[in-house]
Amino acid sequence: MTNLISAEGLKKLCDEYDQLWKVERPKVVQGVSDAAAEGDRSENAEYIYGKKRLREIDRKLKHLGSRLKVLKVAVPPANPTMASFGCWVTYEEETGEERCYQLVGPDEIDVSIGRISIDSPVGQALLHKRLDDEVTVRKPGGESVVYITGISAVRPTSG
């Protein structure tokens, strides 16, 4: 797994960690404590749910903590000549359909806004390629050939 992240992505993870540690967890701990004070815990839904939620929060905090220790901020090149971390890569599929994705680390994946991991099959195929390169992408459904039509440091405007 790649340990690269953008400065924006790192801030987002740090904010999530702080929110869980300073706001969510103390609130849940207080709720569990209050529910425990009511007596019989075996049939106390608030106590049972609170303990479950506390385990979820602790698991997430442990995961975020371990990721934050190893992540390194990568700055994309200002004028990229090849596809690299942080770049927006536009390509045309064999069908003529055009797609545009930003190559990011696994902690920032969000396909709905065009962010794919450099570790994914598409990300791996595009990495280190140049404008007008023909690239073979190996996907679970088979291979396809795409043509790189653009590489940019910022998201290209459509239309």
Image: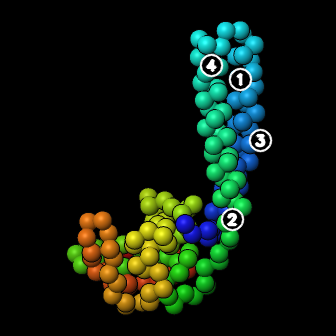
Residue 41 placement (x, y as % from top left): 65, 13
Q: In front of the other: label 3 or label 2?
A: 2
**Mark 3 Cα within 10 Å, few/some/many (few <14, many 20+)?**
few
- Give the answer, above or below, for where 1 lies relative to 135: above
Give the amino acid type for the residue marked by disc 1 in the picture.
Gly
Q: How was this image coloured?
A: rainbow
- Closer to the camera, 37 or 87? 37
Question: Label 3, on which residue?
Answer: 22
Circle 3/circle 1 CB separation < 8 Å: no
Assign a secondary structure to mark 2.
helix
Circle 3/circle 2 CB separation < 8 Å: no
Q: In front of the other: label 3 or label 4?
A: 4
- Among numbered discs 3 and 2, the one appearing first in the sequence: 3
Question: Label 2, on which residue?
Answer: 70
Left or right: 25 as drawn, with respect to 52: right
- Among numbered discs 3 and 4, the one appearing first in the sequence: 3
Left or right: 149 as drawn, with respect to 151: left
Q: CA distance from mark 3 to mark 4?
A: 21 Å
The quadrant where residue 146 appears: bottom left
- Among numbered discs 1 and 4, the one appearing first in the sequence: 1
- Give the answer, above or below, for where 65 lies relative to 78: above
- Give the answer, above or below, for where 146 lies relative to 64: below
- Residue at 53% x, 78% y is 87
**Mark 2 Cα within 10 Å, few/some/many (few <14, many 20+)?**
few
Assign a secondary structure to mark 4.
helix
- Among numbered discs 4 and 2, the one appearing first in the sequence: 4
Give the amino acid type for the residue marked by disc 4 in the picture.
Glu
Question: Label 1, on which residue?
Answer: 31
Left or right: 88 as drawn, with respect to 19: left
